[in-house]
Image (cartoon, rainbow, N blue to C red):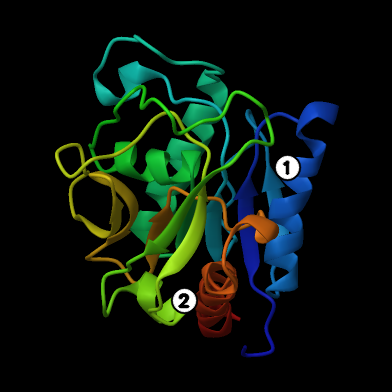
């Protein structure tokens, strides 16, 4: 770390007792990595004074956003879609570091003109705390994800019913981890540090220690932005 605590915009769903534990996991992971957080909820204004953006997990994206009809979506929040798409576009335009997690991964794909498979059976357990586990996930050598995690095979969790494939991958995105023909991680080739993971590294008891390092790498990259502008 540089000693400068970068200001990270963290997007979250609407505050509720139901989401409190989930929101806390994101805050704890980023703060432990050295970030000062600017928490954004649906309807909030897009800040201009942050050093990086983390787009968190949550409900489905409105299918019209990627030119599709709704055949299997749930928990759609148009205000959240608008906020996160605007935040992602602004960050990419400024070449700020961006980390997209689960829904955030899908937001990045949509921002880059990609699409989504609206329902993949077996990837989201019925029970809220249920888990589908992927072991020995291979990460593309030389990728930003590989540099962040050390390149070893990862154990990660899966809790999503929508997905990205090579065929629906957005413009300029490069797949860096693929499981069962589904893209589980990608990065934006022409930007400094834009990484998306379909899994949930903030649920630290469900992923291998190496997978958790993505927060450290993201915050360190954001600290470079802070150092350059302060």
Q: Residue at x 34, y 22 (%)?
A: 118
Q: Secondary structure at mark 2?
A: helix
- The spot of residue 188 in percent (x, y) is 28, 60
Farthest residue toward the left? 167
Relative to residue 61, is residue 26 depicted above or below?
below
Q: Tell me the residue that label 1 is attached to.
A: 22
Q: Secondary structure at mark 1?
A: helix
- The spot of residue 202 in percent (x, y) is 64, 56
* Category of crowding for the residue at label 2, using alpha-carbon neighbours closer than 10 angstroms: few (below 14), some (14–19), many (at least 20): many
Q: Residue at x 35, y 19 (%)?
A: 63
In this figure, what is the number of numbered marks?
2
Task: For the N terminus, give its image quadrant.
Answer: bottom right
In-image side of 113 versus 53 (left or right): left
Relative to residue 161, is residue 217 depicted above or below?
below
In-image side of 123 versus 56 (left or right): left
Residue 219 in view: yes
Q: Earlier in the sequence, mark 2 or mark 1?
A: 1
Residue 75 vs residue 188, the one in the foreground = 75
Residue 36 in view: no
Relative to residue 108, is residue 216 depicted above or below?
below
- The spot of residue 222 in percent (x, y) is 53, 73
Q: Tell me the residue that label 2 is attached to.
A: 149
* Category of crowding for the residue at label 1, using alpha-carbon neighbours closer than 10 angstroms: few (below 14), some (14–19), many (at least 20): some
- The spot of residue 134 in percent (x, y) is 44, 53
Task: For the C terminus, give its image quadrant.
Answer: bottom right
């Amino acid at each position: 770390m540089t000693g400068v605590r970068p200001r990270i915009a963290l997007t979250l769903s609407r505050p509720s007792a139901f989401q409190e534990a989930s929101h806390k996991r994101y805050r704890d992971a980023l703060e432990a990595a050295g970030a000062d957080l600017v928490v954004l909820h649906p309807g909030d204004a897009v800040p201009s004074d942050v050093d990086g953006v983390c787009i968190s997990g949550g409900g489905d994206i409105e299918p019209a956003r990627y030119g599709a009809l709704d055949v299997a979506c749930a928990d759609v929040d148009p205000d959240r879609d608008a906020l996160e798409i605007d935040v992602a576009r602004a960050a990419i335009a400024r070449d700020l570091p961006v980390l997209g997690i689960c829904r955030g991964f899908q937001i990045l794909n949509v921002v880059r003109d990609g699409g989504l498979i609206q329902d993949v059976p077996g990837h989201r357990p019925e029970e809220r705390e249920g888990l589908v586990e992927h072991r020995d996930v291979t990460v593309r050598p030389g990728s930003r994800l590989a540099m962040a995690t050390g390149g070893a095979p990862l154990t990660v969790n899966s809790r999503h019913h929508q997905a990205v494939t090579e065929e629906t991958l957005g413009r300029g995105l490069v797949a860096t981890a693929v499981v069962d023909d589904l893209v589980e991680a990608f990065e934006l080739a022409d930007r400094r540090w834009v990484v998306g993971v379909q899994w949930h590294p903030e649920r630290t008891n469900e992923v291998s220690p190496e997978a958790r390092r993505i927060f450290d790498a993201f915050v360190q990259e954001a600290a470079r932005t802070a150092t350059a502008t302060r």
